[in-house]
Image (tube, helix red, strand yellow):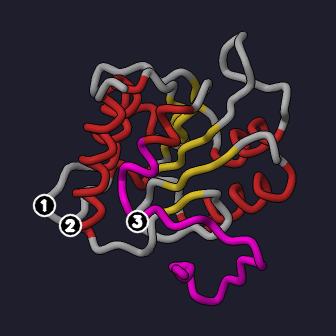
């Protein structure tokens, strides 16, 4: 069982399923009917020798046709890269909207899965806790390198190199057919 990265936090009895293999996350993402990707400002900080997390978000969005909601100043970083996010709002606002079973970025179906990347740990913890308890209609995946027990699926706490490898595998998996 993985432990929360922020050790003083107690996650209750129901905790996230640990993503041991990237294919698990890829399969869940590919089966989703209306996924959404929430990208926070920590996605613009590169760790180690790999690329910035925002680059993974762009690739997952483009290859998987997944709309991005940018938070904080992240929208400017997307625009610098020639990418227009589907929406821009505060992290807490998107958390509130995702809890509403009638809300969707598009006029289509409600979102069935929300992917989180680069939202500060404690803010993501709070949003995921709210969704876990108040929004049974949506599943969540944390793509950050720290275990988020309130999501439905999360990586365990990973070293930087291992996290980059898993993200590359997810990008390849989302882009593949079948």
Identify the residue shown where x is 31% and y is 38%: 173
Q: Report helix, strand or loop for mark 3.
A: loop
Q: Gap between marks 1 and 3, in whole Å?
A: 22 Å
Q: Tell whether 127 sits left or right of 1.
A: right
Q: Earlier in the sequence, mark 1 or mark 3?
A: 3
In the orientation shown, which residue stands out farthest toward the left? 49
Q: Secondary structure at mark 2?
A: helix
| 46 magenta-colored | no
Asked if the residue at tag 3 contacts the one at tag 1, i.e. Cβ–Cβ closer than 8 Å, the answer is no
| Residue 158 x, y percent position in the rendering | 35, 72
Q: Nearer the viewer, mark 3 or mark 2?
A: 3
Establish if 71 lies above or below 81. below
Q: Is residue 2 left or right of residue 64?
A: right
Q: How many marks?
A: 3
Residue identifier under label 3: 20
In front of the other: 143 or 69: 143
Q: Residue at x 32, y 49 (%)?
A: 53
Q: Are marks 1 and 2 in contact (CB under 8 Å)?
A: yes
Q: CA distance from mark 3 to mark 2?
A: 15 Å
State whether residue 103 is above or below residue 99.
above
- Which quarter of the figure has residue 99? top right
Left or right? Give the position of 79 relative to 110. left
Q: Which residue is mark 2?
A: 161
Cα distance between the residues tagged 1 and 2: 8 Å
- Residue highlighted by disc 1: 49
Q: Which residues are magenta?
A: 1-26
Can residue 58 be seen in this snapshot?
A: no
Q: Quadrant of residue 162?
A: bottom left
Specify whether residue 163 is in view: yes
Which corner quadrant holds the N terminus? bottom right
Which one is in front, 59 or 16? 16
């Amino acid at each position: 069982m993985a432990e929360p990265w922020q050790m003083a936090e107690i996650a209750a009895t129901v905790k996230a399923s640990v993503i041991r293999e990237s294919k698990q996350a890829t399969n869940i993402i590919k089966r989703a009917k209306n996924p959404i990707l929430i990208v926070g400002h920590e996605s613009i900080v590169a760790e180690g020798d790999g690329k910035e997390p925002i680059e993974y978000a762009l690739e997952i969005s483009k290859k998987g046709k997944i709309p991005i909601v940018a938070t904080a100043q992240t929208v400017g970083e997307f625009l610098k890269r020639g990418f227009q996010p589907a929406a821009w709002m505060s992290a807490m606002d998107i958390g509130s909207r995702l809890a509403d079973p009638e809300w969707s970025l598009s006029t289509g179906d409600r979102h069935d899965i929300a992917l989180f990347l680069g939202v500060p740990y404690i803010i993501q913890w709070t949003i995921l806790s709210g969704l876990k308890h108040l929004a049974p209609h949506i599943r969540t995946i944390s793509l950050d390198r720290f275990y988020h027990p309130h999501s439905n699926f999360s990586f365990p706490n990973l070293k930087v190199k291992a996290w980059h490898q898993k993200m590359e595998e997810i990008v390849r998996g989302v882009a593949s057919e079948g």
